[in-house]
Image (cartoon, rainbow, N blue to C red):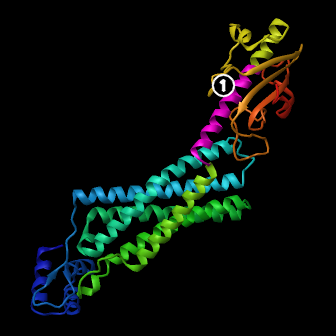
């Protein structure tokens, strides 16, 4: 802005000239409209004997930290919430074409997303409330440059995501690939991006409104619209976290599932080793110690990972044997809430469970002839 233009505006306002008359004179003098508006915006439109300056934009290291933390929490919350809702859709509506997205991986992703939300969501809501409360008490803090830059940058990102989501939705509609699964995910992306645009747009509109138009004191609390919006956001995030925690179960349940997965891996390793041993030696090993002592076979373990007790093994005939383990949870192929690593072969009840297995020539494909739980409890 020209020093001469700034000096003229100051003198004209000091002389009691109205803003409209000053604007008209400067435009007739061929000053650009943007330059004129910028020169007038330096002073507040409030009645006083001399021109009242508005707060000038500034950069503060403290506020840079506060706003960087706030917007980082916003990004983390939005991404984690979107990922969590996507995984809910994948769990409820699995896609057979995506073979790698197993229920176990979905649950692992839900755990990660829920963990992120448990940290980022309270941080975002708390920081947002703190910042808005500070702005309500001291409106001049809205002049922070770092706040303006981060707000407009985030608004640009949110609008870009929203436009991309709409374009993708329209393309799939025209391409005839508008499935319910895709629709839900598109609505999730659009809803989160739209909520971010609404929140940031509302915040920017507050910058254009002088607090009470210069009359009275600024309110000590954030605006009712903000309080309602942040309350709704907090409830929505709390509900998402609660559903995530309910889906994955307690930490004890997750640990029990991992221990059962290790038992399944051990039993598969033992079965493969027995198949190889029988094919090479021509008979079944007498016990697991004999099998473990053979240097030509590879075993993950022959002991339970929790109790350190050897798995039960008994030879039935020349090509059939029985192996038993104690599981903490039931596991069945039709149960889609958890997928054991490696195979679905070892379906079992909770507690002691025995498998009757017949060896085959291919060591990678042991065949279960019969599984039994109750009949072996007395053994």
Name the magenta segment's main secondary structure: helix
Residue 147 can be seen in this image: yes
Q: Is residue 89 above or below residue 37?
A: above
* 347 displayed left or right of 134: right
Local packing at callout 1 (Cα closer than 10 Å; few below 14, some 14-19, many 20+) is: many
Q: In x, y percent, where is residue 10? A: 12, 83
Q: Is residue 250 above or below residue 237?
A: above
Q: In x, y percent, where is residue 375? A: 86, 31
- Location of residue 180 (image quadrant): bottom right
| Front residue of 122 and 157 | 122
- Location of residue 69 (image quadrant): bottom left
As drawn, the residue found furthest toward the right would be 317
Q: Residue at x 38, y 63 (%)?
A: 126
- Location of residue 283 (image quadrant): top right
Q: Quadrant of the C terminus?
A: top right
Task: Tally the marks.
Answer: 1
Q: Residue at x 48, y 54 (%)?
A: 118
Decide whether residue 67 is among the magenta residues.
Answer: no
| Front residue of 8 and 28 | 8
Q: Residue at x 28, y 86 (%)?
A: 212
| Front residue of 230 and 307 | 307
Q: In x, y percent, where is residue 66? A: 30, 59
**Residue range of the region highlighted in magenta in the rendering:** 249-271
Secondary structure category for the residue under label 1:
loop
Q: Which residue is mark 1?
A: 304
Residue 101 can be seen in this image: no
Q: Quadrant of the N terminus?
A: bottom left
* 257 displayed left or right of 362: left
Decide whether residue 266 is among the magenta residues.
Answer: yes
| Front residue of 254 and 41 | 254
């Amino acid at each position: 802005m020209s020093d001469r233009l700034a000096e003229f505006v100051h003198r004209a306002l000091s002389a009691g000239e109205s803003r409209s008359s000053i604007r008209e004179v400067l435009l007739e003098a061929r000053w650009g409209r943007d330059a004129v508006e910028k020169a007038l915006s330096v002073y507040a439109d409030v009645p006083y004997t001399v021109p009242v300056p508005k707060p000038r934009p500034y950069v503060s290291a403290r506020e840079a930290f506060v706003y960087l933390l706030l917007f980082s929490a916003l990004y983390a919350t939005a991404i984690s919430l979107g990922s969590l809702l996507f995984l809910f859709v994948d769990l409820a509506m699995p896609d057979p074409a995506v073979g790698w997205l197993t229920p176990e991986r979905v649950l692992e992703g839900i755990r990660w997303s829920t963990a992120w939300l448990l940290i980022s969501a309270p941080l975002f809501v708390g920081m947002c409330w703190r910042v808005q409360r500070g702005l309500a008490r001291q409106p001049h803090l809205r002049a922070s440059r770092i706040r303006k830059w981060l707000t407009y940058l985030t608004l640009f990102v949110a609008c870009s995501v929203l436009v991309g989501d709409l374009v993708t939705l329209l393309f799939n509609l025209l391409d005839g690939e508008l499935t319910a699964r895709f629709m839900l995910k598109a609505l999730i992306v659009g809803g989160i991006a739209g909520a971010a645009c609404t929140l940031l747009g509302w915040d920017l509109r507050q910058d254009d409104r002088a607090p009470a138009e210069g009359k009275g004191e600024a309110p000590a609390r954030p605006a009712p619209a903000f309080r309602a919006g942040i309350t709704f956001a907090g409830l929505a995030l709390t509900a998402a976290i609660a559903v995530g925690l309910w889906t994955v179960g307690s930490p004890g349940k997750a640990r029990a599932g991992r221990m059962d997965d290790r038992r399944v891996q051990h039993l598969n390793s033992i079965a493969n080793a027995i198949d190889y041993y029988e094919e090479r030696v021509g008979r079944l090993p007498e016990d697991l110690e004999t099998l473990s002592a053979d240097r030509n076979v590879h075993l993950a373990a022959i002991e339970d990972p929790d109790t350190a007790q050897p798995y039960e093994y008994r030879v039935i005939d020349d090509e059939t044997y029985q192996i038993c383990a104690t599981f903490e949870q039931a596991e069945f192929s039709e149960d889609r809430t958890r997928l054991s690593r490696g195979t679905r072969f070892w379906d079992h009840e909770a507690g002691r469970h025995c498998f009757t297995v017949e060896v085959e020539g291919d060591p990678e494909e042991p065949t279960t002839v019969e599984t039994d739980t109750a009949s072996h409890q007395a053994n």
